[in-house]
Image: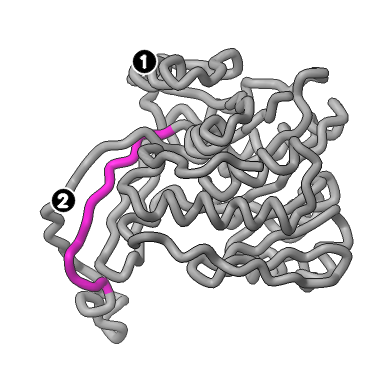
Amino acid sequence: MAALICGSLAFDTIMTFEGRFAEQILPDQLHILNVSFLVPSLRRDFGGCAGNIAYSLKLLGGEPVPMAMLGSDGGEYLQRLEALGISRRHVGQVQDTYTAQAMIMTDRDNNQITAFHPGAMMQAHAHRIEPDAAVKVGIISPDGRDAMLQHAAQFVAADIPFVFDPGQGLPMFNGEELTRFVEQATWVTVNDYEGRMLADRTGMTLGELSRKVQGLVVTLGAEGCEVWVDGAKTHVPPVVPAQVVDPTGCGDAWRGALLFGLEKGWSLVRCAALGNRVGALKIAQRGPQNYTLDFKPE
């Protein structure tokens, strides 16, 4: 069975700053901020939440179906998807703009500063979700605002259970809109910061939010994650990586594992444990789509 993955396909330009951002930014001078970082290491990777999640799910043996929009420069990404054996049937291309681009700078403590140009992603609402017996589960990851709103309603109309994963797109929505997303979704995933923002904007605690869905997960990076089901919290411990090289795409790797487990009907705790394991493999490699598995999921 397939998983429909709504989100972005993007090119990531990833830079490494060998110092610490905190040592270069003076807190009392933020009103006149003017900084420059020397980045000896620079590379360009395939990225975007939909692409990264699809890569993770495919590695695990799932059937990802990304729904996304590429720009005039997206031919290379289409070739990439074909080479990976990932469906392109819901990947469109517009010719009057560029593919989404993320410029990501990481310091020695794995803090990140990101600039994101949405480009063709802003046309993602042109795709429409229809009932499909082959699709067992879906996810709404960061995408164009209109696409996220419309795809949530379309998942409900198509009777396809889905994960609401607002990520960096969360600030685009007010409390009423976020509450509606939660009410429509079957599961919710956020990181610690996003979880606090979601709670603040909706006026509900994480426990209260979890009672509106089958489960809510808060990822905590090196601390593992919290699984909330019907107001009760379970901590799922982390998997210690062989080395910490690059955090870019770790959350998406985790979400690919989540979809794999949900397709198989696993408990949310078991899904989260697999996500922690895959995330530990990803963080040990550079780039969001360059890691491999050293185990077979069971």
User: Where does the image place residue 243, in percent across and percent down from the top left?
Assistant: 33, 61
Instruction: Please name the residue shown 71% across and 54% down the image.
Output: 270
Q: Is residue 67 above or below residue 287?
A: above
The range drawn in magenta is 10-21
User: Where does the image place residue 167, in percent across and percent down from the top left?
Assistant: 57, 52
Q: Is residue 4 above or below residue 13?
A: above
According to the picture, the residue beneath numbered tag 2 turns out to be 41
User: From mark 2 to mark 1, how far is it between C-alphas?
Assistant: 26 Å
Q: Classify residue 262 by image quadrant.
A: top right
According to the picture, the residue beneath numbered tag 1 turns out to be 75
Left or right: 2, with 155 as reference point: left
Q: Is residue 93 above or below residue 185?
A: above
At mark 1, the secondary structure is: helix
User: Where does the image place residue 92, in percent across and percent down from the top left?
Assistant: 52, 16
At mark 2, the secondary structure is: strand
Q: Residues within 10 Å of mark 2 (few under 14, many from 20)?
A: few
Instruction: Please name the residue shown 28% across and 42% down the image.
Output: 13
